[in-house]
Structure formats: C-alpha cells, structure tokens
Image (tube, helix red, strand yellow):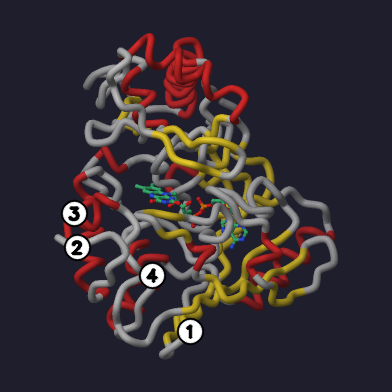
Amino acid sequence: MSEHVPLSTLTTLRLGGPAEYLVECTSTDVLVEMIRLLDEQKVPVLLLAGGSNLVIGDDGFDGVVVRIATGEITVTESVVRADAGAVWDAVVEAAVTAGVGGLECLSGIPGSAGATPVQNVGAYGVEVGSLLRRVRLLDRRTGETGWVEPAALGLGYRTSILKHSDHAVVLEIELDVRADGMSAPLGYRELSVALGAEQGERRPTAQVRDHVLGLRRGKGMVLDPADHDTWSAGSFFTNPVVPDERLGGVLEAIASRVGPDVRIPQYPADGGTKLSAAWLIERAGFAKGFPGPEAPASLSTKHTLALTNRGDATTADLLALARQIRDRVEDVFGVRLHPEPVTVGCEI
Ligand SMILES: Cc1cc2nc3c(=O)[nH]c(=O)nc-3n(C[C@H](O)[C@H](O)[C@H](O)COP(=O)(O)OP(=O)(O)OC[C@H]3O[C@@H](n4cnc5c(N)ncnc54)[C@H](O)[C@@H]3O)c2cc1C
C-alpha cells in the first residue's frame, strides 16, 4: 500500500490530487479479498483502472484507491474473456489477431475491459452491451461473487446500474464473437465511407480496426502522451436526449440561432430525440481549441467534445471551462449538457 500518491499520475486527464492510500491488485482473488476487507472496515474506496473516465478533484481522495491491475485475456472461436484490469484495446487486438470478429469498432478506446460495461462503452455504431455474454461481479453488499447476464445491468446510452454506484466490482467479462473473422455489420456512416463500404456490410476485422484507429487518431481519441489533445476523458458531455414535449421549442431556438435552412443533426433515441453535443457546442460559439493556446484547459484542437489539460491545468480549471460551455449551450438552446465521466471529490 502506497501513501499520498498523486492521482494525476493515474488519470488520462493528468488531473487529481493525492490518494491517501493506493493499493494495486494484480490478481482477481486479491482484488476480491481487498474489497471485502475494506468494506468490512467501512473504509472509503475508489475503484480505478485506466483512469480514462474519471475527473478527480484537486483535493484528491481521502480513502483507499484500489487500482485494478489484473490482465489475463483468453480468446476462443466464439468467446473472448478478459480480466477486469485487462487493457481494453489489447482485448480488441487479441480478438482481431485471433481472427474473430465483433469488437473491432471499439478499437482504440482507452481504459480497462472491466470498465466497459460500467458506461456501456460505444463507438462507430457498436456498444459493448450488444457483445457482452456475461459479467462476473463482486456484490459489495453481500460480499458474494457471481456471473450476471447483461440484461441485469440496465445498460443504456453511456450508462448502466454500475455507473455512479458502489454496489459492485466487475471482476471479468465475456464477449460473444464471430468465428469468421468478419466485422459486425457496419452501422456508422463515417466508418463505412472511410472503408468504401455500404452501411450494413461486413469487412475483415483487421481492416475495420485499422480504419477505426485512423479515424480516432484524427480526432485525438487515441491516447498519445506527446499530444495534449489526448489528455482528456474522451467526450466530456453525452449527447443530450430531448423529450418529445420539449423538442419543438428546442429546435426553434436552434433554428433562430443557426438559420432555418441549416440541417440539425438528430436521431431517434429512448425517451426522445438525441442531438449532437459537439454540434450544439460549436453552434453556441465554441470553436475547437477554445479559449486558446495559452489557456491551461481548453477544448481539444481536434474535437469539440473533448476538454483537455494543456499541461499545467488543475481540475478547477477544467471544471470552470466545462461550466462555461454547459451554461452557454443551455442559455442559447435550452438544452442542458451532462458530463460523461465520473466525478470524484468535485462537481460540474
Ligand atoms: C481519448 C479518450 C477517448 C475515449 N473514447 C471513448 C469512446 O469512444 N467511447 C466510450 O464509451 N468511452 C470513451 N472514453 C472513455 C473511457 O475510455 C471509457 O469509459 C473506459 O471504459 C474507462 O475505462 P477505465 O478503465 O479507464 O475506467 P476508470 O476511468 O478507471 O473508471 C471509470 C469508472 O468506472 C469505475 N470502474 C472502473 N473499473 C471498474 C470495475 N472493474 N468495476 C466496477 N467499476 C469500475 C470507476 O470507479 C469509475 O467510476 C474515452 C476516453 C479517452 C481518454
């Protein structure tokens, strides 16, 4: 167990004050025993794996940060199994290398396998929830471990019952894959255009992975320590879902700002219509790189939805920028943006 560890060294934003204690668990058995022990003693626990979806306050965390550092991955013709701490992109790469398909659209997403069900990670038309076969959990209320079906996890758009909850630890996941080495049906226009394919077509997994990684790099969405545009938590805001009864008023407010002939990106979603957070942020007046190169925290110069640390930022700097963006989008369009990352010891 280490003491006073700066959490900025463990998050992709490179932000966060000290952890009172940090313990690293490299085996699932040790992880289970550690959590049971800490829970028995009622010690505050923060689970952390890749630190790529966490905004931690400048005062850090008073308690024990449990770093999940397990890492085994096994691939068969029909199932990929990974320990919670396995690096997610290594899981995707192992599947592609073994010639099994299904995971390739989720290439390049930072973080761990165990965190993928937590917010039902998704990209390029695929969500992990559509691939999960089962998830092994430690139920912290009973101390018991067991496998659960994905239907029990309340998976939704960037959410599940595991997000913002201390009730369970993901220990391992299993994913269904295709044995024929072909991708999932392509469901995202930008990707099918890049591949010169039709929507719904399948392509060899390695080809799809290469294109996904290329598209993501162009947006600063593949981690690169030398590139401050990737010192982020990925998309900072989720795409807002506007309920039917409010949609007319919101579209009117948008049209009055951007003009009646501009096409507003909108997609059917559970509970209403999904709008593009990046589009709204840009139309509210925030360009890529806002507020400029001298600022400690700014929008990525490659993607309007990523808030980044330019090197010397504090969490307070980042949150001030987040509030400025959220508040102006709400003032102008009447739509409130909500953060996608989990906040610890701070609020937006
Ligand atoms: C450059 C960049 C690009 C990104 N692109 C995408 C994207 O395309 N799509 C997408 O969905 N996300 C994206 N993200 C967000 C992030 O990568 C994912 O949410 C990822 O799954 C987080 O994994 P992690 O291991 O880093 O989780 P952490 O940040 O360590 O933890 C996140 C949350 O999950 C909890 N947690 C972690 N592990 C477990 C576990 N085993 N059991 C229970 N709870 C746990 C933590 O306590 C915390 O609340 C991106 C992030 C970055 C930095």
Closer to the N terminus: mark 1 or mark 2? Answer: 1
Q: Name the residue under label 2.
A: 197
Q: Residue shown at 39%/82% (left/top)?
A: 178
The amino acid on which the numbered mark 3 sits, given as a three-letter code, is Val
* Tag 3 secondary structure: helix
Q: Mark 1 points at which residue?
A: 79
Residue 193 is labelled as 3
The amino acid on which the numbered mark 2 sits, given as a three-letter code, is Ala
Residue 152 percent across, percent down from the top left? 71, 64
Closer to the N terminus: mark 3 or mark 1? Answer: 1
* Tag 4 secondary structure: loop
Q: Name the residue under label 4.
A: 103
* Tag 2 secondary structure: loop
Closer to the N terminus: mark 1 or mark 4? Answer: 1
- Alpha carbon of mark 2 to alpha carbon of mark 3: how far? 6 Å
Is residue 191 found left or right of 77 in the rendered image? Answer: left
Q: Are circles 4 and 2 on residues that touch, CB within 8 Å?
A: no
- Alpha carbon of mark 4 to alpha carbon of mark 2: how far? 18 Å
Is residue 55 found left or right of 307 in the rendered image? Answer: right
Q: Residue shown at 28%/18% (left/top)?
A: 261
Q: Nearer the viewer, residue 130 or 292?
A: 130
- Alpha carbon of mark 1 to alpha carbon of mark 4: how far? 11 Å
- Alpha carbon of mark 1 to alpha carbon of mark 2: how far? 27 Å
**Extreme residue toward the bottom, this view:** 77
Q: Are circles 3 and 1 on residues that touch, CB within 8 Å?
A: no
